[in-house]
């Protein structure tokens, strides 16, 4: 059964700053049927996956159940300065300034097939940086799975190395 997901995403205008329409997924996460449906659909039809990579921060909520569903492990791509061990790091630009994204240096083994998961695809910079990190460690990006895509920002244009899928797209 497919659940109607869109009605469970709350729009918060001007959060965290003026002009941003924040997609709050907490109503969806607390709905058992919706959460189950999202995990099933994010995990479906990727072929062989060796590990799921979730992006800081809400990719840490959606990624692990997708990994469990696929019978594989989970690795976190974290914002700069959070991982305790040796890291691989990529800088990427935000609207204001620069951010760093990091993976532990041993997070991906050479040739491993990695599914990247996050809640929202906006400009694509964060997911692109994650794909770059995976590739630098010798992994192969199998795909990018998002709950929500802000289609009007055309983030998928930056993710040319693998298929991009989203469950809800705002045109
Ligand atoms: P971007 O790099 O522009 O694609 O931004 C994607 C990251 O920022 C994801 O990790 C999202 O969680 C977060 N994000 C960007 N825009 C929004 C939004 N409108 N609502 C909620 N999260 C967002």
Image: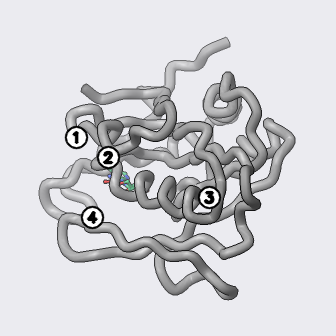
Which quadrant of the rendered structure holds the N terminus? top right
Q: Residue at x 65, y 59 (%)?
A: 138
Q: Using the image, determine if residue 54 lies above or below residue 23.
A: below
At 25% from the left and 66% from the top, the residue drawn is: 94
Q: Is mark 1 within 8 Å of ligand 1?
A: yes
SS class, disc 4: loop
Q: Residues within 10 Å of mark 3 (few under 14, many from 20)?
A: many
Lower position in the chain sequence, tag 2 or tag 1: 2
Percent position of residue 95, x then y: 19, 65
Q: Which residue is mark 3?
A: 60
First in sequence: mark 1 or mark 3? 3
Name the residue beneath numbered marker 1.
Answer: 153
**Residue pointed to by mark 4:** 16
Residue 70, by quadrant, is top right
| Residue drawn at x 60%, y 70% as measured from the top left | 103
Identify the residue position indicated by label 2 in the image. Answer: 122
Label 2 lies in ligand 1 vicinity (Cβ under 8 Å):
yes
3 and 4 marks in contact (CB < 8 Å): no
Contact flag, marks 2 and 1 (Cβ < 8 Å): yes
The residues bearing labels 2 and 1 have C-alpha atoms spaced at a distance of 6 Å
């Amino acid at each position: 059964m497919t659940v109607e997901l869109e009605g469970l995403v709350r729009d918060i205008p001007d959060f965290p700053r003026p002009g941003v329409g924040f997609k709050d997924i907490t109503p969806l996460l607390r709905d058992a049927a919706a959460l189950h449906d999202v995990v099933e659909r994010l995990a479906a039809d990727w072929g062989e996956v060796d590990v799921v990579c979730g992006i800081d921060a809400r990719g840490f909520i959606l990624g692990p159940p997708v990994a469990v569903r696929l019978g594989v492990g989970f690795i976190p791509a974290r914002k700069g300065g959070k991982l305790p061990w040796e890291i691989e790091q990529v800088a990427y630009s935000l609207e204001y300034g620069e951010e760093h994204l990091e993976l532990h240096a041993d997070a991906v083994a050479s040739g491993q097939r990695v599914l990247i998961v996050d809640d929202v695809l906006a400009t694509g910079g964060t997911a692109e940086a994650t794909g770059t990190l995976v590739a630098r460690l010798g992994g192969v990006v199998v795909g990018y799975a998002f709950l929500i895509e802000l289609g009007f920002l055309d983030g998928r244009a930056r993710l040319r190395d693998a298929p991009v899928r989203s469950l809800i797209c705002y045109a």
